[in-house]
Image (cartoon, grey):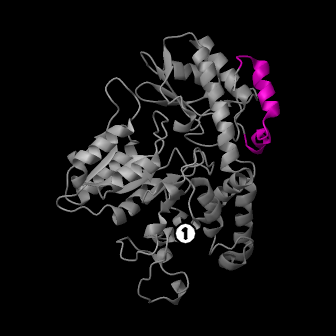
Amino acid sequence: MKYQNTLQFAQQQDKEDKLSYLRNRFHIPKDKKGNNWLYFTGNSLGLQPKATKEYIQQELDDWANYGVEGHFEAKNPWMPYHEFLTGNMAKIVGAKPIEVVVMNTLTTNLHLLMVSFYRPTKTKYKIVIESDAFPSDRYAVQSQLKFHGFSEEDVIEWKPRKGEELLNIDDLETIVSEQGDEIALLLIGGVNYYTGQYLNLKRIAEIGHSKDCVVGIDLAHGAGNISPELHNSGVDFAAWCTYKYLNSGPGSLGGLFVHEKHAHNKDLPRFAGWWNHNKETRFNMRQPFDVMAGAEGWQLSNPPILSMAAIKASLDMFDEVGMEALRKKSEKLTGYFEFLINQIDSDDIKIITPSNPKERGCQLSIQVKNANKSLHKKLTENNIITDWREPDVIRCAPVPMYNSFEDVYRMVSILKGLL
């Protein structure tokens, strides 16, 4: 659409926005004078839905009233509680219910998945990651290599071309074509945390599988932000957190995807616990381990209900709105954000996130020339909450559930003044 660099235009877009009502369902942090912060860091921690307290209170009340019987008598019985999240989560990531489970935290899930899917041999053992993968992913794959008797040097990095910030998928194809006989696993961030680049998951899967490599995806910055269509992509597994775009609260549980093609393979090696044993015989005790089919077969322990209640509050809202509507608004809102930044006459900043809306979510990464974090600090002093990532990027995420066009306009106006 044709954007305009005026407050009136931004306010008119908010009036016409069919999802603008969602903003009132969130707690917007305020400064000491009672003014709303301009909050652009849902890519690190999403805001709290107002309904979250009610959802958690329900479980606290049922715990008080039923004690252990809450596993069966609570309004939302605790025994199958994780199943209440599965359908909505599957819709968000484009998966079948059998392929998804909410459990543990992101890096724990990646390790559990690599127990099953990183099966190195003497000749096929290397792991491919992005050169600027999130540190946790790098640490995870390095430790897996060491655990299996290999070296940190057996990590292969998919790098941007010289003088560029973004990854070129043709380069990944070259890496796999030339070294695929030695590569056991590709573990790639579906949306890069630093640049905000959204990668073509289907093509990544095709490239990896062409050389019999397993393909896994870290969707920490993708779940609730883009529509990854995990099932159709053909990737073998994925994991993500829920406290960013899924608004579940600090340190909340993560999600896990295992493609349906692996759902009934009981021979896959895995760590075992009570909760991935057949639910029909789980309480018979003293039974040989009988792993559950699908993603549930990677669970270990009974889940923390209070954390899941917060996730349920958010997922119910996502189900009400739908990812299609959220993505439509996101592309429009982020497009306006990009337009306004590009209107600033300054050589001190530039956007390194792809300009093609299909190659990004809502995050724009603003690279700062001669960066020393002072610009980010000044934004914070003006009650604009963004996110700094070394060495030189301010990450900003206008989240379609609670950010407005006026938020974007006011943020860029202040940024222009500071520059």
Residue 46 among those drawn in magenta = no
Q: Is residue 408 visible?
A: yes
**Type of amino acid under label 1:** Ile
Q: Is residue 399 left or right of residue 145?
A: right
Task: Name the spot of residue 31 as percent of width and height, x first.
Answer: 70, 29
Q: Is residue 381 visible?
A: no
Residue at image location 61% in from the left, 54% down from the top: 92
- SS state under label 1: helix
Residue at image location 57% in from the left, 44% down from the top: 226
Residue at image location 70% in from the left, 65% down from the top: 59
Bounds of the magenta segment: 4-27
Q: Nearer the viewer, residue 276 or 10?
A: 10
**Within the image, what quadrant is residue 234 found in?**
bottom left
Q: Which quarter of the figure is the N terminus placed in? A: top right
Magenta part, dominant SS = helix
Q: Is residue 410 left or right of residue 116?
A: right
Residue 18 among those drawn in magenta = yes
Badge 1 density bin: few <14, some 14–19, many ≥20, Cα 10 Å: some
Task: Name the spot of residue 206 as percent of width and height, x first.
Answer: 39, 52
Task: Name the spot of residue 253 as percent of width and height, x first.
Answer: 54, 57
